[in-house]
Amino acid sequence: MPYDKYHYWPIRTGPGGSIPGPGGSIPGRDILNQVLQDLAETKDDIDRLEILDSFEAWVKRCSQAEMAEMMARQLIVQAQPFVQAGILGQFPPVSPIHRGRPAQGES
């Protein structure tokens, strides 16, 4: 099994800035810069291919996470009326308090 160099990089599911590295937040450095730096520092062609394969796996994980997030949001939208009705059915019925009145005399 090949080494997945970028396995622990945070998954990005939305637009936005740099992604912090596994050792903590590094301003201005995202995974693309890290991949380019790793490729420049590596002299072996097989290692370069493994870096690119690891980056591809990270991109696929991001894609899957984004798809799962969108499907979960859609499921929540579709299921919300049923869940809400089920929860409301668990509450006791609400009605005004019955207040007895004294009998009125006939005139």
Image: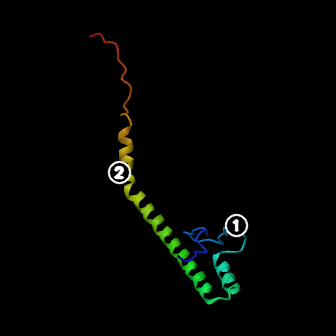
Residue 68 vs 101, above or below: the answer is below
Instruction: Report the quarter where the C terminus lies.
Output: top left
Residue 89 vs 65, above or below: the answer is above
Which sits earlier in the primary sequence, circle 1 or circle 2? 1
> Real-space Cα distance between discs 1 and 2?
44 Å
Secondary structure state at the residue bearing disc 2: helix
**Mark 2 highlights which residue?**
82
Q: Residues within 10 Å of mark 2 (few under 14, many from 20)?
A: few
Residue at the far left: name it.
106
Instruction: Give the x, y percent position of residue 42.
Output: 68, 85
The colour scheme used here is rainbow
98 to the left or right of 107:
right
Residue 21 vs 77, above or below: the answer is below
Q: Residue at x 53, y 71 (%)?
A: 62
Residue at the far front: name it.
1
Instruction: Give the x, y percent position of residue 27.
Output: 73, 70
**Three-letter amino acid code of the residue under disc 1:** Gly
Kindly identify which numbered label has been placed on residue 15.
none
Instruction: Give the x, y percent position of residue 84.
Output: 39, 48
**Mark 1 highlights which residue?**
23
**Three-letter amino acid code of the residue under disc 2:** Phe
Instruction: Give the x, y percent position of residue 33.
Output: 67, 79
Instruction: Between residue 84 and residue 70, name the one nearer to us.
Output: 70
Q: Residue at x 64, y 80 (%)?
A: 35
Foreground mark, 1 or 2? Answer: 1
Residue at the far right: name it.
27
Residue 67 vs 50, above or below: the answer is above
Q: Residues within 10 Å of mark 1 (few under 14, many from 20)?
A: few
Q: Residue at x 31, y 12 (%)?
A: 104
64 to the left or right of 15:
left
When asked about the image quadrant of residue 106, the answer is top left
